[in-house]
Image (spheres, rainbow, N blue to C red):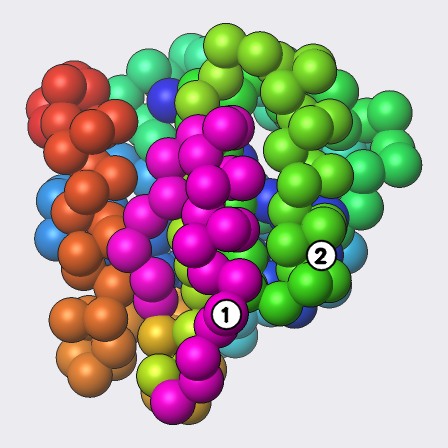
Amino acid sequence: MIIIIGNQKGGAGKSTLTLLLANYLTMVKKRKVTVIDMDYQQSIAQKYEKAKVLENEEPYEVVAASLEDYPDLLELIKSDPETLVLIDLPGKLDDDGLLPVFKSADLVICPFAYDEFSFESTILFSVVFKKLCPDCEMMFVPNRIKANVRYDTQSDVDEQLKKFGMVTAAIPDRIDFQRTSTFQTPISVFPAVRPVFDGLYKQHLKMEPNA
């Protein structure tokens, strides 16, 4: 199964969400996972290489790749149907190399915030993606939500996004998210993300092989 994590808006928390999901799937659900880091900053791949220097045993593989690499990578992905592949997308939609990535996806996870710029970018991403892949399911994750802020547009935003897919429970904004690595999720973070990932797993992944 191929899950892409993407949004047109930079700073939506794609890379951190990808790490958290990879850790959840491997450490909690004991699934085989490969992460493909296509983000221009390649922060996941950098964390992975840094952790390898410390001689930790890798719970999953992280592959730094460009969009040009993807057609060849896809053949390798298809050869192992039991592996869940998470792809951290670049934050722009103006590259034709995204088309084969979009076309191969089984599920799209789109982190967003309840501000005007994030909402507009999320809608743009959703419209473009659904035109290319109308049958692929989308999930929208309210991310980095501040507990002491009232979001007047929240219900309207949720209603608009529900036209494209499911809106999950929100993930709060916490400083300790920054300590997430390719080898661990801080224990303090786990209760904040588990409701979202449990719902995702039950709906989309439970019937996968060995689930």
Is residue 21 a member of the stretch shown in magenta? no
Residue 110 visible in the current orientation:
yes
Report the magenta residues as a range: 148-171
Give the residue number, with chain letter if any, for mark 2.
9
Give the image location of residue 93, x and y in percent: 81, 38
Decide which of tag 1 and tag 2 comes sooner along the chain: 2
Task: State the residue in front, 56 or 138.
Answer: 138
Q: How crowded is mark 2: few (under 14 residues within 10 Å), some or many (20 or more)?
A: many
Task: Left or right? Give the position of 130 relative to 41.
Answer: left
Give the image location of residue 46, x and y in percent: 60, 67
Task: Left or right? Give the position of 119 relative to 210.
Answer: right
Give the residue number, with chain letter if any, for mark 1.
152
The amino acid type, in three-letter code, at marker 1 is: Asp
Image quadrant for the C terminus?
A: top left
Task: Left or right? Give the position of 199 relative to 80.
Answer: left
Query: Between marks 1 and 2, how big is the CA–CA gap?
Result: 20 Å
User: In the image, is residue 131 above or below residue 129?
Assistant: above
User: In the image, is residue 208 above or below residue 19?
Assistant: above
Task: Left or right? Give the position of 173 relative to 93.
Answer: left
Say which residue appears at 50% left-offset and 28% top-offset.
163
What numbered label is drawn on residue 139?
none
Image quadrant for the N terminus?
A: top left
